[in-house]
């Protein structure tokens, strides 16, 4: 077409960016070792981000990388979801074909990619909002990982300040999860566009905390660098005066330097504003070229040749003739698929802003008409959004409303719920301006509000969701449409729970009162209400309603609701301390889920059974089930929903067995997946337990602050209240404040509802026993009152298995029996604490040798766990008794470990991760993992902490 035309105003010399190019190259090298995932490249408009990325991409490609490009467009804010990833996928299809891409994914997974490109066939029919969106993310992650198995991959996404919410979410997801893969993402954005409320700001803040993500700011050019750029453009060194003028006017922004060089006719005249600078090169073009550029600007930063021809009314030859000067002047550039791209978005913006009001409306109307007539004029999947954008720009309210509704429905199918919201808001805004709007789109105004609330719920935009729900409720009469009102009330209650606001229970009860007759609407409400009642301690009523709902579900033949209600009943059994019955009910629900193919049902039941197994002392089985559940969550596309809750329960099982490093890794991974607030709080509580045991006081305080514990924020759920109180007591004890811990115990025991979940309740009571023992010397009467209250609660509790029995023994003060029970359960930290308490009792009885033997058994357990506070207590008591803790170390075998294994062990003992060790020893993380496994086997230990303790005990690291 016009590929032979070459622009003249861009310097052929790459000036002033060697340092930044080195940073990118180093990041690429780190990515090849699995130690980097993304570079966030920020800079103001026109500063040269694109040129830098292009130069880096050329180097990376020459070094064997597969470079994929995707760019965000300003239209994304109107709902063009996943635009950069669609572009990158389209490039990949051209390069290797759909069949090759399909072979890299699990069987049938390419149907998820069909939501982005029609070349992959018909999209999957799964309408589950959480499942489809999550699965699409997982497939894109898998695709990049598989591509990177053969050679490194660089994914360039430009202008993410224009990215739609779905693209931002996918960027964040990939940045957190591209670990140990040879993939580097380079993400550019305009730093000067990021106002305080810009949606990219929190994303950048979040990514800045992700390991392997580097932030790079591109500064303006210095005076000498501007001179170098000018010399590259001119081909000769510029005059000093000209350098000064251009530098002062451009202020070191390369794009402005280019504009000044084009406008400078030797008379020293320069435009007075940025618009003049940008438009200077445009105004020198022929009038017909300028007219066509204005038409192109209305189409966006990129417009296809056929579409531009149709809108302008020019033939192919006439259009090429008109555009040739713009290509030669480097105002437009030629892209693939017979498309034109403005060299810089600022140029397109400046040209578009020059349109007169009538011209603006006419051109957008022409684009809407032509795309509506032939949707193949725009890339696949973009037609609905582009039509909506242009009809709105044309100020045609009737077609703007219809097209916005259509585009919103397309966004739902692509799981782009955030992009659907502004489109639905546009429908609502235009509603009163369009007579007969209800007939035009086939639904009433309230249905649009309901759809908007659904989108808000799917993308967790709770504040907007509440507004939509309230507006919809204001338009409905309970007596006329009770089922519709009930569904909205349930959603409102769900929003309240997500925001930890009061009133959810009232919403659920009101909803139930509106659907008194047996039917699916009542069954749906009963699922939510019965579960909420269980979690707030109202188990009897929750059980009654769950049983009513179960009978109704069986009558209706709805096996999914039947399974959900069985799980709700199992929750009640668990809270009442009937753990075996809990496990059986969850297993029954899981089988139901498998029969009907409900991933949500399977995963919810599985998550609850991980917890049940851990309470039954079958922690190794719980871990196996947790790993299987994690894999299934990925299969069902629910990693960030059900999967994060499974990971929480997996982490609890790992923590109980003293596998704390693994538990922390699981927690960090789950947190990186963006769980719901309630699941995040569960994960943070698990992390706080480990931090308390290791004496990480500041970390514990930060977690308690986030949970609202230090501000006495009210919680609705009994388990959360109990766990928060237990952690609060532990924090005060760690700080040496038993009197404050005693006050927390008093407040908890004075509550009308208490947790009866066996292991949880007995664990809390054992903590209260510890608090009372510590507070008794200074506050004997208060400590005795709290003991009495605790004993009264203990009398009401069941002992449902070996874990609750071990905690009961601790509460009763039978510490030797407790230590034996913990040993059978393979729980080293609890065993070491019981041994210390038993040693203290023996010391007070004058049995020095008995105390010493127990301290010697406890010390290596606490040391291996790096449980510093417990180690300090054990060593302190040993010093006071005048006894030694360590036996004579066994003579180390010189052949026990290889030299490389000794190097790895030394770094393990320093607390380094596999990735840290790999970087230091210049080996892969997978090789480190193999070495660590060999070390654990040879030393006959189970954890990295135990390996470190064994290394010191056997003097393996002395040199």
Image (cartoon, grey):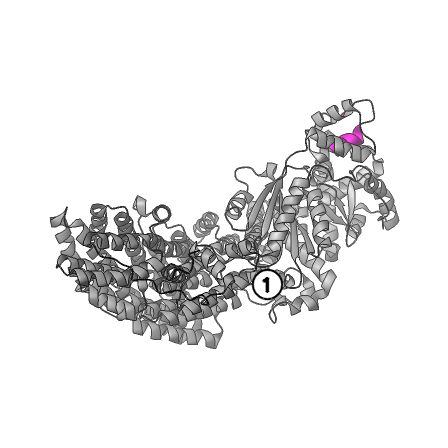
Up/down of 18 relative to 537, above or below: above
Whole-percent x, y for residue 870 in the image: 29, 55
What are the residue bounds of the magenta stretch? 257-271
Crowding near pointer 1: few (<14 within 10 Å), some, many (20+)?
some
Q: Indicate whether 234 appears above or below 746.
A: above
Q: Is residue 339 magenta?
A: no
The C terminus: image quadrant? bottom left
Which residue sits at x=78%, y=31%?
261
Residue 220 is situated, as x and y percent measured from the top left of the image, at 66, 33
Where residue 228 sits: x, y (%)?
75, 33
Residue 253, image quadrant:
top right
Q: Nearer the viewer, residue 896 or 269?
A: 896
Is 803 situated left or right of 68 in this image?
left
Residue for badge 1: 142
Is residue 256 among what the camera can see?
yes
Q: Quadrant of residue 415?
A: bottom right
The residue lying at 24 percent from left, 52 percent from top is: 876
User: Residue at left 77%, top 22%?
Assistant: 241
Q: Is residue 751 visible?
A: no
Above-or-below relation of 354 to 37: above
Left or right: residue 460 compared with residue 782: right
Q: Secondary structure at mark 1?
A: helix
Q: Is residue 258 magenta?
A: yes
Residue 788 image position (x, y, % from top left): 13, 57
Q: Along the line of sight, which residue is nearer the eye, 863 or 378?
A: 863
């Amino acid at each position: 077409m016009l590929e032979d035309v070459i622009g003249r105003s861009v310097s052929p010399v790459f000036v002033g960016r060697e340092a930044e190019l080195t940073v990118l190259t180093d990041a690429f090298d780190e990515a090849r070792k699995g130690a980097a995932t993304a570079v966030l490249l920020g800079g103001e408009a026109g500063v040269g981000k694109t040129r830098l990325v292009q130069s880096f991409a050329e180097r990376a490609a020459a070094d064997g990388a597969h470079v994929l490009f995707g760019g965000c467009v300003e239209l994304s804010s109107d709902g063009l979801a996943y635009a950069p990833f669609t572009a990158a996928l389209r490039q990949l299809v051209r390069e290797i074909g759909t069949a090759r891409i399909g072979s890299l994914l699990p069987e049938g997974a390419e149907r998820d990619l069909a939501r982005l490109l029609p070349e992959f066939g018909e999209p999957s029919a799964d309408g589950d909002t959480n499942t489809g969106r999550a699965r699409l993310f997982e497939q894109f992650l898998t695709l990049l990982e598989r591509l990177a198995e053969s050679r490194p991959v660089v994914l360039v996404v430009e202008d993410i300040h224009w990215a739609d919410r779905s693209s931002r979410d996918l960027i964040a997801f990939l940045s957190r999860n591209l670990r140990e893969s040879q993939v580097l993402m380079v993400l550019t954005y305009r730093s000067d566009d990021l106002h305080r409320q810009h949606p990219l700001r929190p994303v950048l803040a979040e990514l800045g905390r992700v390991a392997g993500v580097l932030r790079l700011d591109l500064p303006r050019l210095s005076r000498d660098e501007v001179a170098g750029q000018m010399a590259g453009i001119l081909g000769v060194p510029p005059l000093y005066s000209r350098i000064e003028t251009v530098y002062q006017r451009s202020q070191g922004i390369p794009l402005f330097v280019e504009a000044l060089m084009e406008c400078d006719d030797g008379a020293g005249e320069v435009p007075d504003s940025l618009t003049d600078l940008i438009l200077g090169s445009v105004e020198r073009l022929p009038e017909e070229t300028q007219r066509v550029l204005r038409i192109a600007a209305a189409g966006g930063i990129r417009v296809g040749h056929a579409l531009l021809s149709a809108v302008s009314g020019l033939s192919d030859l006439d259009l090429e003739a008109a555009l040739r000067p713009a290509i030669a002047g480097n105002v437009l550039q030629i892209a693939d698929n017979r498309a034109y791209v403005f060299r810089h978005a600022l140029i397109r913006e400046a040209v578009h802003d020059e349109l007169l009001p009538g011209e603006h409306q006419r051109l957008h109307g022409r684009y809407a008409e032509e795309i509506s007539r032939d949707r193949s004029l725009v890339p696949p999947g973009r037609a609905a959004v582009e039509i909506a954008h242009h009809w709105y720009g044309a100020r045609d309210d009737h077609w703007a409303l219809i097209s916005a509704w259509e585009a919103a429905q397309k966004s739902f199918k692509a799981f782009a719920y955030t992009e659907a919201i502004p489109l639905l808001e546009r429908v609502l805004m235009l509603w009163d301006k369009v007579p007969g709007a209800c007939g035009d789109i086939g639904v009433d105004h309230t249905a649009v509000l309901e759809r908007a609330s659904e989108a808000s719920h799917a993308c967790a935009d709770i504040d907007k969701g509440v507004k939509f729900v309230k507006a919809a409720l204001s338009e409905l009469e309970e007596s006329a449409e009770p089922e519709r009102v009930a569904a909205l009330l349930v959603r409102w209650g769900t929003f309240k729970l997500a925001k930890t606001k009061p009133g959810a229970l009232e919403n659920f009860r009101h909803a139930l009162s509106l659907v008194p007759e047996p039917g699916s609407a009542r069954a749906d409400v009963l699922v939510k209400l019965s579960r909420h009642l269980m979690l707030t301690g109202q188990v009897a009523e929750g059980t009654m309603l769950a049983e009513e709902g179960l009978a109704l579900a069986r009558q209706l033949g709805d096996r999914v609701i039947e399974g959900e209600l069985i799980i709700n009943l199992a929750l009640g059994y668990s809270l009442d301390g009937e753990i075996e019955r809990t496990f059986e009910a969850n297993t029954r629900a899981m089988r139901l889920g498998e029969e009907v193919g409900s991933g949500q049902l399977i995963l919810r039941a599985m998550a609850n059974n991980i917890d049940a197994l851990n309470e039954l002392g079958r922690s190794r089985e719980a871990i196996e089930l947790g790993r299987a559940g994690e894999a299934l969550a990925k299969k069902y596309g629910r990693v960030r929903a059900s999967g994060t809750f499974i990971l929480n329960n997996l982490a609890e099982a790992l923590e109980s067995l003293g596998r704390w490093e693994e538990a922390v890794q699981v927690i960090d991974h789950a947190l990186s997946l963006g769980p719901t607030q309630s699941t995040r709080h569960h994960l943070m509580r698990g992390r706080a337990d480990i931090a308390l045991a290791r004496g990480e006081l500041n970390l514990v305080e930060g977690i308690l602050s986030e949970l609202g514990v230090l501000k006495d924020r009210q919680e609705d759920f009994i388990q959360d209240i109990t766990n928060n109180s237990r952690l609060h007591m532990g924090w005060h004890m760690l700080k040496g404040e038993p009197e404050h811990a005693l006050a927390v115990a008093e407040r908890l025991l004075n509550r009308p509802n208490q947790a009866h979940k066996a292991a949880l309740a007995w664990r809390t009571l054992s903590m209260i026993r510890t608090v009372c023992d510590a507070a008794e010397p200074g506050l004997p009467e208060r400590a005795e009152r709290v003991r009495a209250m605790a004993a009264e609660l203990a009398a009401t509790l069941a002992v449902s298995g070996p874990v609750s029995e071990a905690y009961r023994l601790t509460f009763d003060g039978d510490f030797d029996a407790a230590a034996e029970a913990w040993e059978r359960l393979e729980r080293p930290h609890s065993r070491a604490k019981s041994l210390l308490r038993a040693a203290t009792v023996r010391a007070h009885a004058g049995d020095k040798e008995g105390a010493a033997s127990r301290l010697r058994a406890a010390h290596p357990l606490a040391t291996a766990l790096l449980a510093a506070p417990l180690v300090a207590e054990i060593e302190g008591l040993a010093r006071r008794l005048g006894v030694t803790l360590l036996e004579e170390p066994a003579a180390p075998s010189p052949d026990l470990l290889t030299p490389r294994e000794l190097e790895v062990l030394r770094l393990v003992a320093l607390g380094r991760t596999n990735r840290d060790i790999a970087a230091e020893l210049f080996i892969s993380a997978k090789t480190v993992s193999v070495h660590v496994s060999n070390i654990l086997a040879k030393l006959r230990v189970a954890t990295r902490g135990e390996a470190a303790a064994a290394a010191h005990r056997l003097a393996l690291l002395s040199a």
